[in-house]
Image (cartoon, helix red, strand yellow):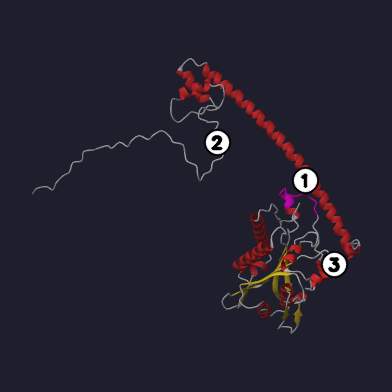
Amino acid sequence: MIHPASRLEVVIHSRADGRSAVKSSAYCARTSWRDERTGRRFRAGKLGGLLSHELINWDGDAAALWNGAERAEARGNARVVRELRPSLPAELPLAEQVRLVRGFSLWLRDEYGVAIQADIHAPRFLAGAEERLHQAGKLELVQEDYLEALFDPARTNRNFHAHILMTTRKVCPSSGAFGAKTRSLDDRKTGPQEILRVRQEWERRTNAALQRIGSNARIDLRSYKTMAAEGDAPEGLISQDHLGARRAARSRRLREEGEDTSRAGRRRRAIQAHNEATWQSWLVLRALEREKSREAAEAIARDREAARKKEADAERHRLQNVQSAQEAEAAISQASQFESLKTGSPLAQAISWALQETDEPASEDSGEFSSEVDLETYEPPQGPPRPEPVLEVKRVRVRGPRSR
């Protein structure tokens, strides 16, 4: 089954859609900013749920960053912000989540030269009254109790997630000036490959963070189609449509009243049931196929071992019945089970091997590799003493200067 945090959504904020970079920044940072281009003020300072806020590749505050990004664009349908919305595994403590988002943001800066605002938001509380207090910033809990409640599956949906806002232009780190557009992310040919590379980098870093804390959980950002083609998922899985803030809120209200009877809710439950049944059937079939493959491999191994022993017995019998040195040499050259040593007579070694009751090569010590070795404390066994070096003395004729 796929980890629930296997999600990274990419959203382009364009003026053509009525978007404002300052408004997006204020919402993500849970603060209030004034958009200098439109003269509007966006107030989100009373909202709760902000766990972390950082700016990368920018010395001022977020208001100056995004007002500058708005001023850098002249077109009425310009793209001002590119937003990444990755889910964060609930297995990661908050400090590790912050470390993951910061490291990924620094990678984006190094790769594309952009300025970044990175915010981590808390999950939603399951109880409606508690969630309303949480969203209003009136949930009166000390920091330790608040974090404990956020990671409690009985109280929240544990949907930790980040909002990573990237400028669509490169930013000079020393002067703060906005430069050229990041065309590699917008181009029809290179854009999909670059987004795929970004997703793969997030997946790699997230799984590394999970491994670092000793968790066996892993995320997978591949599509169902790609996973099925590579044999890692069943065919026929249906991807869920993103509900969005309004439909998600309506779904929560209906569930509080009893059941989500909306069209989107019914469709969502049907898809979930279909995917779960498909996964379970595929896992059972894969387990049966692996068991059959294991049994077939064991049967092949047994047959090969029996054939090897039979051939070894036949070669041993031929070596025991040789009548001359020529016959012995011929038997040795045709043998496939005998391995001669680097030292000693091949004929003597072959005869010794043929007289053994087992078919193990004479050069093999059965207990040589029977236990693990600590490479830091291991000392090689003492071999035979090396002979003293022989000093070979040569006569050297020394010629003096010629007399004139």
Residue 40, compared with residue 195, is above or below; it is below
Residue 49: percent from the left, percent from the top? 75, 69
- Contact between marks 2 and 1 (CB within 8 A): the answer is no
Q: Is residue 189 visible?
A: no
* Image point (87%, 55%), residue name: 270
Q: Amino acid at mark 2?
A: Phe
Q: Residues within 10 Å of mark 2 (few under 14, many from 20)?
A: few
Image coords of residue 68 (percent x, y): 66, 79
Which mark, by number, is residue 369? 2
Q: Residues within 10 Å of mark 3 (few under 14, many from 20)?
A: few
Instruction: Identify residue for label 3.
Output: 128
Q: Secondary structure at mark 1?
A: helix
- Which callout, 2 or 3, points to the residue nearer the camera? 3
Identify the magenta region: 227-237
Q: Is residue 300 left or right of residue 282?
A: left
Q: Which residue is mark 1?
A: 283
At 56% from the left edge and 76% from the top edge, which residue is drawn?
Answer: 174
Q: Which residue is located at x 65 percent, y 54 percent? A: 211
Residue 357 percent location from the top left of the image: 56, 21
Residue at the bottom extreme? Answer: 39
Q: Mark 1 or mark 3, which has the lower sequence index?
A: 3
Q: Is residue 168 visible?
A: yes
- In the image, what residue type sits under mark 1? Leu
* CA distance separating discs 1 and 3: 37 Å
Which of the two residues, 107 or 356, is positioned nearer the viewer here? Answer: 356
Q: Which is nearer the eye, 35 or 372?
A: 372
